[in-house]
Image (tube, coloured by chain):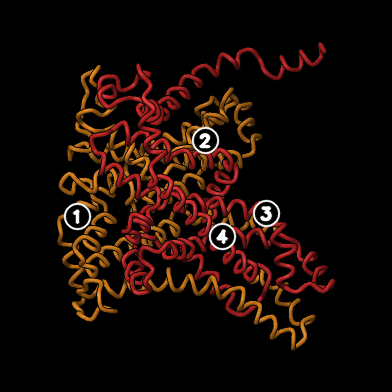
Chain colours: A red, B orange
């Protein structure tokens, strides 16, 4: 008991606490400036417009819930939420499924041209999406995929392939060859090995690339902007942009809409924070 | 290095695989690889090539492939246009501000949150959070906050008499956009720096401190050089992102007032979709691509070269 106490005292000397005070001050200043916009929006959504202009930052004197409830009972908000979710989930499934199959080939097969194909995919990291947007629009129009979620899903998946393949290939390669040999001797087909052994083992990597794909799709704006003209297929970002145009002077209502639109992204971040940060920093340093 | 990696597999494969299984092997390879390859060729490679092709035609985007060949006219017109020159200026301003202000700030915050202090996990989560919000949410939120008449920023600054027109004034629009970019992205760079810092063995820092180096000198002569590869990558990502900047600008200003915040991507979307000059817009996108590519090649050749060699040898050592 006494020894534990002295140990702790030795490990954390008193002067360290004094030292961290300026650090805390700086961190709090940065934190507050980061939080102000969101807090302003959150409180602003509970205000009437006249109060918002008189009292932009204080607590609302009368809590108006109509801004939030109006959005929540409107069909368009939920339809956009559903469209965004559907597109994000489908994009993720397609991206990860196709990438996993390709990464399996790149990691576990030796064949002529393997490095050429792999380099082709990695070069895809260098292709900025904006450069291809006009031909993609023309192509989707020719295929009749405008105003069709499939057009956005397939395009997003195609652009998601390079990074996903690179990350998964790295992970697949790290799984020892002995496991594959053992499975083959036990009569496992290549697909059986991939499906029953490799994929379950790669669960952490799959989680990481899935999280990246979900967030990328959820926040995508440029592609839905050009593909979807019919309001019924709008995703959340398109809906927000349109809402701002429609209620230009009704600031409180836009703030409420923004806050509600933030909830899924922030909730997802809360759940998947480790995968997201790990994946992004790994993707950044490897890409 | 690649030959080394290939060597053992190439040696191992022919022996246990008899002829009939080998055909099966090619079938599996094809079945596994083709779906990804087809999608990639159709929606990434082909559109890139079409953009390249269309950039030398006059084309409104209709009627199959373009036919009205005009050579390099789109490019000469682009390079003579004042808007394009402005786009380039905006790019330089944003890159300079990012590299000289945003990234040092991110690095400082990362070093701060690397200290042992209470609540640092919470700060990290908070600072990174804007990165997961969409550009549209961020853009709309800040367009309301920076609104000249009723926006929060002017309300707060009125106390000290520093109101500004922000996004509505050509003189302040670029710094305002940069402010929003910093709010949204500095947490991302902070996380990269934190990851990089964690790869530096603490023994090195402690050794410097034992040798009597002060905090600043330890940072300047030990931590900073060892963070070099991380910093170079973060600069790289920042520049590539800025070359393609679209969403935030489109939402915040649409490129205005009177083109004073326009970026190449905004100009391209404007010509391509609003005025249906797809050939000319393709020329802009080709220049955008060429800029990214040239920057990437030059940067990797001259700035990141040593890092890449180091990364490869360390990777070889690990596996």
Decide which of tag 2 and tag 1 comes sooner along the chain. 1
The residue most toward the right is: A186
- What residue would you read off at disc 1? B85
- What residue would you read off at disc 4? A93
Q: Secondary structure at mark 2?
A: helix
**Marks 4/3: CA–CA distance:** 14 Å
The quarter of the rendered structure image containing the N terminus of chain B is: bottom right
Quarter assignment of residue A5: top right
The reply to whether callout 2 and callout 3 are in contact (CB within 8 Å) is no
**Marks 2/4: CA–CA distance:** 47 Å
Q: Do pointers 4 and 3 mark residues of a single chain?
A: yes
Pointer 1 indicates a residue of which chain? B
Within 10 Å of disc 1 (Cα), the crowding (few <14, some 14-19, many 20+) is some
The quarter of the rendered structure image containing the C terminus of chain B is: bottom right
Rendering coords of residue B266 (x, y %): 26, 54
Q: Is residue B1 visible?
A: no
**Marks 4/1: CA–CA distance:** 42 Å
- What residue would you read off at disc 3? A203
At x 21%, y 77%, the residue is B71
- What residue would you read off at disc 2? B221
Residue A236's disc is: none
């Amino acid at each position: 008991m006494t020894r534990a106490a002295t140990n702790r005292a030795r490990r954390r000397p008193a002067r360290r606490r004094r030292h961290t005070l300026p650090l805390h001050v700086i961190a709090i200043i940065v934190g507050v400036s980061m939080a102000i916009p969101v807090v302003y929006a959150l409180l602003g959504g509970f205000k009437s417009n006249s109060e918002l202009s008189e009292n932009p930052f204080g607590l609302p004197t009368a809590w108006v819930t109509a801004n939030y409830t109006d959005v929540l009972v409107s069909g368009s908000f939920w339809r956009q939420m559903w469209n965004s979710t559907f597109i994000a989930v489908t994009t993720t499934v397609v991206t990860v499924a196709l990438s996993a199959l390709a990464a399996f080939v790149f990691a576990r097969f030796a064949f002529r041209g393997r490095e050429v194909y792999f380099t082709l995919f990695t070069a895809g990291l260098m292709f900025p999406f904006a450069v291809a947007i006009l031909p993609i629009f023309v192509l989707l129009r020719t295929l009749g995929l405008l105003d069709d979620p499939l057009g956005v899903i397939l395009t997003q998946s195609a652009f998601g392939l390079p990074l996903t393949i690179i990350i998964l290939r790295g992970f697949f390669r790290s799984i020892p060859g002995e496991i594959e040999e053992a499975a083959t001797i036990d009569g496992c087909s290549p697909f059986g090995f991939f499906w029953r052994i490799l994929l379950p083992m790669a669960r952490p990597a799959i989680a990481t690339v899935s999280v990246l794909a979900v967030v990328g799709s959820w926040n995508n704006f440029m592609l839905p902007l050009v593909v979807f003209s019919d309001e019924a297929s709008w995703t959340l970002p398109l809906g927000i942009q349109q809402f701002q145009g429609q209620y230009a002077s009704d600031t409180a209502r836009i703030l409420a809409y923004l806050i509600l639109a933030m909830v899924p992204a922030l909730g997802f971040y809360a759940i998947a924070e480790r995968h997201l940060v790990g994946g992004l920093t790994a993707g950044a340093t490897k890409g | 290095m690649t030959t080394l990696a290939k060597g053992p597999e190439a040696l191992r494969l022919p022996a246990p695989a008899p002829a009939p299984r080998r055909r099966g092997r090619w079938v599996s390879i094809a079945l596994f690889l083709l779906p990804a390859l087809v999608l990639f060729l159709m929606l990434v490679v082909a559109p890139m090539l079409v953009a390249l092709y269309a950039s030398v035609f006059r084309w409104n985007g209709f009627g199959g492939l373009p036919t009205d060949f005009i050579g390099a006219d789109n490019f000469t017109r682009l390079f003579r246009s004042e808007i394009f020159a402005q786009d380039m200026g905006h790019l330089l301003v944003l890159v300079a501000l990012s590299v000289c202000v945003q990234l040092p700030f991110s690095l400082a915050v990362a070093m701060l949150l690397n200290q042992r202090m209470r609540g640092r996990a919470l700060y990290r989560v908070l600072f990174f959070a804007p990165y997961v919000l969409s550009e549209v949410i961020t853009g709309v939120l800040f367009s309301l906050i920076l609104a000249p008449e009723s926006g929060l920023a002017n309300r707060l600054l009125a106390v000290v008499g520093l109101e500004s027109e922000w996004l509505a004034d050509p003189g302040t629009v670029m710094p305002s956009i940069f402010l929003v970019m910093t709010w949204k992205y500095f947490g991302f760079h902070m996380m990269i720096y934190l990851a990089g810092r964690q790869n530096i063995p603490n023994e090195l820092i402690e050794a410097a401190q034992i040798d009597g180096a002060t905090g600043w000198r330890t940072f300047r002569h030990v931590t900073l050089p060892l963070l070099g590869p991380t910093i170079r990558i973060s600069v790289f990502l920042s520049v590539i992102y800025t070359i393609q900047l679209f969403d935030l600008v489109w939402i915040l200003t649409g490129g205005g007032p009177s083109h004073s915040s326009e970026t190449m991507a905004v100009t391209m979307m404007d010509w391509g979709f609003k005025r249906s000059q797809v050939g000319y817009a393709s020329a802009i996108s080709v220049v955008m691509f060429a800029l990214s590519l040239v920057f990437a090649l030059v940067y990797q050749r001259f700035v990141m070269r040593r890092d890449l060699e180091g990364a490869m040898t360390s990777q070889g050592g690990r596996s």
